[in-house]
Image (tube, helix red, strand yellow):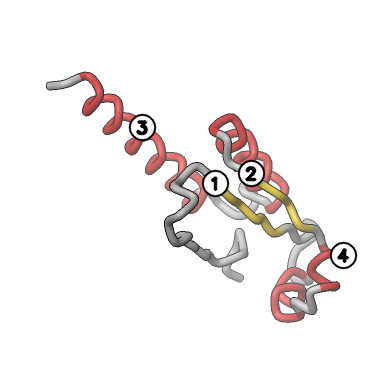
């Protein structure tokens, strides 16, 4: 097997395992703060830009549904904006969205 194929598979498996940890960790351990720290630690060294948005930003954006859900937690709400600009600048962007909570109460 070619080494580059093996390495690509290893990277994909590592990414899947990281996603699994983020989604399956109990919410009392995977708080918004811990989630943000994990993502920043993993993605920033790869050239991915990660910006954490706080309650004040969410209020300015009138994100009332998100803020209402956050009242059920002792932890402050945080939202991540993640951007990777490593593709072809002439290509259309790929935009992914995800649910913005670390618990389902």
Q: CA distance from mark 1 to mark 4?
A: 27 Å
Asked whether the residues under the numbered discs 1 and 4 touch, taking CB atoms below 8 Å apart as contact, a structural biologist would say no
* Residue appearing at x 22%, y 19% in the figure: 3
Q: Earlier in the sequence, mark 2 or mark 3?
A: 3
Q: CA distance from mark 4 to mark 3?
A: 36 Å
Q: CA distance from mark 2 to mark 3?
A: 19 Å
Q: In the image, which is nearer the foreground, mark 2 or mark 4?
A: 2
Q: CA distance from mark 1 to mark 3?
A: 19 Å
Q: Earlier in the sequence, mark 1 or mark 3?
A: 3
Asked whether the residues under the numbered discs 1 and 3 touch, taking CB atoms below 8 Å apart as contact, a structural biologist would say no
* Residue appearing at x 45%, y 46% in the figure: 87
Q: CA distance from mark 2 to mark 4?
A: 21 Å
The disc placed on residue 11 is: 3
- Of the 4 image quadrants, the one containing the N terminus is top left
The disc placed on residue 61 is: none
Q: In the image, which is nearer the foreground, mark 1 or mark 3?
A: 1
Q: Earlier in the sequence, mark 4 or mark 3?
A: 3
Classify mark 1: helix, strand or loop: loop
Residue density around tag 2, few if under 14, some if 14–19, many if 20 or more, within 10 Å = some
Residue density around tag 4, few if under 14, some if 14–19, many if 20 or more, within 10 Å = few
Question: Which residue carries the number 4 mark?
Answer: 56
Nearest the viewer among 95 and 102 is: 95
Q: CA distance from mark 2 to mark 1?
A: 8 Å
Could you tell whether 58 is left or right of 84 in the image?
right
Question: Which residue carries the number 1 mark?
Answer: 85
Nearest the viewer among 90 and 39 is: 90
Q: Earlier in the sequence, mark 2 or mark 1?
A: 2
- Of the 4 image quadrants, the one containing the C terminus is bottom right
Question: Which residue carries the number 2 mark?
Answer: 49
């Amino acid at each position: 097997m070619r080494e580059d194929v093996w390495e690509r598979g290893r990277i994909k498996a590592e990414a899947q395992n990281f996603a699994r940890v983020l989604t399956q960790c109990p919410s009392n351990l995977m708080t918004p703060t811990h989630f943000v720290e994990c993502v920043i630690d993993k993605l920033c060294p790869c050239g991915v830009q990660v910006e954490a948005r706080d309650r004040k930003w969410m209020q300015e954006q009138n994100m009332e549904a998100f803020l209402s859900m956050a009242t059920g937690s002792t932890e402050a709400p945080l939202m991540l904006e993640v951007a990777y600009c490593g593709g072809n600048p002439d290509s259309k962007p790929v935009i992914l969205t995800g649910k913005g909570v670390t618990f389902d109460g």
